Image (cartoon, helix red, strand yellow):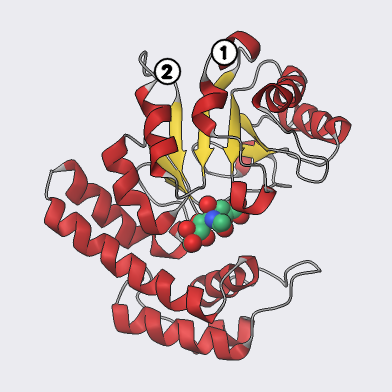
Amino acid sequence: MASPKKKLQGLVAATITPMTEHGLDQIVIHVGALSLKESQELAQHAAKIGADGIAVIAPFFLKPWNKDNLINFLKEVAAAAPALPFYYYHIPALTGVKIRAEELLDGIQDKIPTFQGLKFSDTDLLDFGQCVDQNHQRQFAFLFGVDEQLLSALVMGATGAVGSTYNYLGRKTNQMLEAFERKDFSSALNHQFCIQRFINFVVKLGFGVSQTKAIMTLVSGIPMGPPRLPLQKASREFTDNAKAKLKSLDVLSFTDLKDGNLEAC
Ligand SMILES: CC(=O)N[C@@H]([C@@H](O)[C@H](O)[C@H](O)CO)[C@@H](O)CC(=O)C(=O)O
């Protein structure tokens, strides 16, 4: 897993490595599940193996229909690991739970004392901005999850980012962060546009977890394995096209895309 500098994090969904040996600064484990009991067990397990925090998506088969239902679910999961910082993972496009994050934040720490922040994977920058706006004491982390829009979210007050493309576009994204920090907005925008060119290209080909695995294998040479059903493996055609695009944009932190890596895909 790439570990780019600054505030970016690749996705760590689960780990079997003893937590003392992973070499990462922090590990937040996602413990969301369709069943509350399962989620609580995962939270307890995360605490036992030394995670630095837990994150939870909304349950999406039997959905919470309002803010209070959702908070009650999250509260029970958080209570299963009372010593761990708790993050709500807001990803409405995948869960179908469209309760606005800014509504959820209102008074949340009274209900969930360990609440630490949001991973916000949605393109609604009004909702995102209103989350940041109401955080007067600046106590929460706002980790943005739409990689192609990170610059806009930084302007709105994102405090970090978690996304799939940082596993291989980390260098380019760090260049954007550095330009943003030195207030060189024109360079920051150029870097964001470059990232967008790649994402726009792969989105048109069909882009998801399988394709992310294929690109990560291609770039690192570390076989990421096939996706689990019902997902299907990315096609060779996709990988060839993604490789050509990465080369033409010159965005890789790795000096070489070795031919063997393509075979590993
Ligand atoms: C909907 C989605 O998959 N969003 C990604 C982004 O990193 C996304 O791949 C990227 O912005 C390209 O659209 C992450 O926020 C979430 C993610 O990868 C995950 O939870 O597996």
- Labels 2 & 1 near each other (Cβ < 8 A): yes
Residue at the top extreme?
110
Q: Which mark is residue 139?
A: 2
Please tell me in which quarter of the rendered image ligand 1 is found. Answer: bottom right
Q: Is mark 1 within 8 Å of ligand 1?
A: no
Q: Is mark 2 within 8 Å of ligand 1?
A: no
Q: Quadrant of the C terminus?
A: bottom right
**Would you name the residue on which mark 1 appears?**
109
Within-10-Å neighbours for mark 2: few <14, some 14–19, many 20+: few
Q: Is residue 195 above or below residue 75?
A: below
Q: Find the distance from the CA under tag 2 to the CA under tag 1.
A: 10 Å
Dot 1: element = helix
In the rendered image, which quarter is residue 84 located in?
Answer: top right
Q: Which mark is residue 179?
A: none
x, y percent for residue 199: 42, 69
Residue at the spot 71% in from the left edge and 71% down from the top edge: 225
Position of 249 with respect to 29 (left or right) is: left
Q: Quadrant of the N terminus?
A: bottom right
x, y percent for residue 166: 44, 57
Q: Nearer the viewer, residue 136 or 232?
A: 136
Residue at the spot 39% in from the left edge and 59% down from the top edge: 148
Give the amino acid at mark 2: Gln
In the rendered image, which quarter is residue 159 located in?
Answer: top left
Dot 2: element = loop
Of the residues under marks 2 and 1, which one precedes in the sequence?
A: 1
Within-10-Å neighbours for mark 1: few <14, some 14–19, many 20+: few
Q: Is residue 263 above or below residue 224?
A: below
Position of 205 with respect to 159 (left or right) is: right
